[in-house]
Amino acid sequence: MIDVLPADAPPTDLDATVRRVDDGVATLDVRDLGPSRGDGIFETIGVIGGHPQALDAHLARLANSAALLDLPVPHEAQWRRAIGRAAASLPADRQGGLKVVLTRGLEGPGAPTGWIVATPADGDFPERETGIRVVTLDRGYASDVAVRAPWLLPGAKTLSYAVNMAALREARRRGADDVIFLTSDGFVMEAPTSTVILRFGDRIVTPRTDIGILPGTSQLSVFAFAAARGLHTVEAKIPVARLAEADAAWLVSSVRLAAPITHLNAAAMGVDVELTRAMNDALLARQA
C-alpha cells in the first residue's frame, strides 16, 4: 500500500510512505470508490529480471489518466520508489507484472488510495509463438467520441473494465482468444488489454489514439524497434476492411508482449514468424 503524496509534496523519506503487505492480510476498505464504483486508474507494468519495463511511458500514461478523471497528479518520485520496491520483490529468473492502482479513496474525505500488486507470470506465454485467434466486436463508440463525449473517458486507463472482460468472454464463446474493438463507424480501435499493430509491406501501422483509445506503452517500443530495422511506422485511422489485407498483425501488451494474430473472424491470416521473434526479443531486452 502507498500513503499517496500530492505531486508537489516537499522532499521526504519516500520509503516510509510505502508499506509492504503480506498475502492474505486485509488492507482495503470495502467503501473505497475504486472497487465499489470503478472510480480509479491503473497501469500494468511488465517486469523482467527485476526491471520494470517502459516505466517512463507507464508513469506518463498514469498521469494522463489521473488528469482525465480529475484525480490528484501522482507524485512521480514516490511511485517510482514504490514500483522499484515491488519489482524487486519478484523472482529475478522469470517474468512478472505489476498492477499499479490509484483510486479516489473513501467517499467524503477526498484522500486517494494507492497500491501495487506484484505477480510472477504463470508461464512462458506460448502464444508469442503459437499465435492467437481474434474476433472483431463493436465497441459502441464512433471515432469522434473523444471530441464529442469526453466524459466517457476515452484514452483513460480506468478500473471500469467490465465491458472489456465481457468482450473476452464473448470471444471465447465464438472460439477465439481475444478481441479487436471497432468503432461504430467502422474503424479499428484496440483490444481489451492490448494494442493492435499491423504490417503492410515495410509499413508498421497502429490506430490513431484520437479515436478514443489508449496510447500503447509497448507499441512505442515496437515502433522504436521497427524504425531501427528500417521499417516505416505510422499512426493511422484504419478502416476495418484493412485488417484482412494486412501482411501480418499482432496484439501487443506489457506482459504478454507481441502475440501474432493467426485468425481473424475464423479466417486465416499471414504470420511473420521472423519479425515476431525479433519483436519479442527486443521487448524482452528493454531497459527503459
Image (spheres, grey):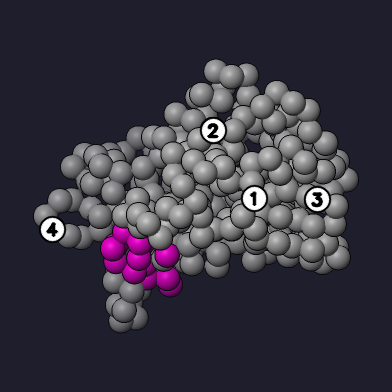
Sequence-wise first label, 3 or 2: 2
Q: Residue at x 51, y 55 (%)?
A: 211
Image quarter (top left, top right, bottom left or bottom right) of the C terminus: bottom right
Q: Which residue is mark 1?
A: 238
Are the residues at dot 4 and dot 3 in contact (C-beta closer than 8 Å)? no
Sequence-wise first label, 4 or 3: 4
**In the image, what residue type sits under mark 4?**
Pro
Are the residues at dot 3 and dot 1 in contact (C-beta closer than 8 Å)? no
Sequence-wise first label, 2 or 4: 4
Q: Which mark is residue 137?
A: 2
Residue range of the region highlighted in magenta in the rendering: 64-77
- Name the mark nearer the viewer: 3 or 1: 1
Give whichever of 84, 104 is nearer the camera: 104
In this rendering, the count of numbered labels is: 4
- Give the CA distance from mark 2 to mark 1: 15 Å
Q: Which mark is residue 109?
A: 4
Give whichever of 250, 50 is nearer the camera: 250
Q: Residue at x 31, y 39 (%)?
A: 25
Are the residues at dot 3 and dot 2 in contact (C-beta closer than 8 Å)? no
Give whichever of 47, 251 is nearer the camera: 251
Q: Which mark is residue 18?
A: none
Q: Residue at x 52, y 29 (%)?
A: 168
Drawn side of residue 1 relative to residue 252, left or right:
left
Residue 150, relative to residue 35: is it above or below?
Answer: below
